[in-house]
Image (cartoon, rainbow, N blue to C red):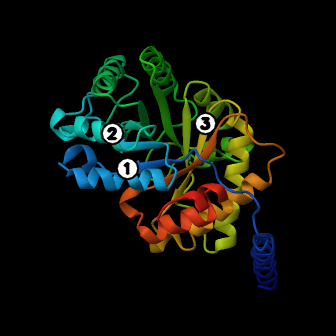
Amino acid sequence: MRWTGWTVAYVLGLVALVFAGAWVWWQQEPEARGTEVNALWARHQWVGEPHSDAEYRELAERLRHNRITDVYFHTGPFEADGTVPPHKYRYARQLIDAVRKYAPGVRAQAYLGQIRVVDGDGVIELDDPKVRAQVLRTDAAFLDLGFDGIHYDFEPIYPDDAAFITLMRQTRELTRSRGRLLSVALEQATLMDTVQPVYKTLLPRGGRYHEPPRPNRDFLRAVADLADQVAIMTYDTALPTGALAGWHFARHTRTTLELIGDRTTVFIGVPTYRPLMHWAEDLDVALRGVRRGIDDLERPPKRPYGVGVYADWTTGPDEWALYRAVWLPRTAVSGAGT
């Protein structure tokens, strides 16, 4: 019993040190500001439902005012065979025309994805060449409509997913032949690749608990070499304090930009929602953490980088005001309208 008591006390002491160290680290005010290149995930209703001219104008003003350069308009999801029924995006053409008219320079991308089949569970089987071929035909249809790019969000994606890499390579050929963009949303990368064999041994794939679908460094580099943009879904931390959640965003920002920031445009995903289960995570914490991560870089990346706001349907005026105040370059904020 005595040894049990000492063990518990030791563990609690270590936890207290971690919390205290994170709190001290978190007190330093970030110096870095954001950039003029930022993304936004947007709801399906923009392509699936009619909107008035005033609503399109309001959307365009919001994009310009907040320096959003890329919008991932949800146009899917894919059906199991790789199609998307046309009635689901019947108003896409009107949206594209409105963005071009009222927000020239903003790139409207078709946001497409689905639950990836893994060990028999899921919806879309990317290992099937016929399904991948249909996905490409669907992509081409969206490009024909006028979208500026294809944005993939297949989940889960594991770092040994050769079929996904094949699809990325094929899609890159398509988008580049049209002069368009290929972007992709990925889970945050593993910070320590050496522990992944432990996950594979202790938590094998299949069932409710399995190896986390985190890209390792080699996989992230391979994807970055194929994509024009990589958006990292850094949110959903489920950490109990702002300091720990902020450290999470800072660490992933620095690691990702160091790893692929010279290869492709990177957007670090930040949330504008705050479910109770995610404890301390919110937009303020996320942006402060991203800025701390940028501060820690030895040099800025060669390619553009920014944040990806998730999502337009959870972002109200207060969140946008905070985003402008703490993220946008000061010259952009001072020059912005109301």
Cα–Cα gap, marks 2 and 1 = 9 Å
Residue 111 appearing in the image: no
Please give the residue where the numbered disc 1 appears in the rendered image: 60
Given the image, on which type of amino acid does mark 1 rest? Ala
Front-most of 334 and 59? 334
Given the image, on which type of amino acid does mark 3 rest? Thr
Please give the residue where the numbered disc 2 appears in the rendered image: 101
Decide: marks 2, 1 in contact (CB < 8 A)?
yes
Q: Residue at x 80, y 53 (%)?
A: 296
Looking at the image, is 229 positioned above or below residue 244?
above
Decide: marks 2, 3 in contact (CB < 8 A)?
no
Front-most of 67 and 48? 67
Q: Quadrant of residue 143?
A: top left
At mark 3, the secondary structure is strand
Question: Residue 223: x, y in percent?
Answer: 58, 29
Bin the neighbour count of mark 3 within 10 Å (Cα to Cα): few under 14, some 14-19, many 20 and up: many
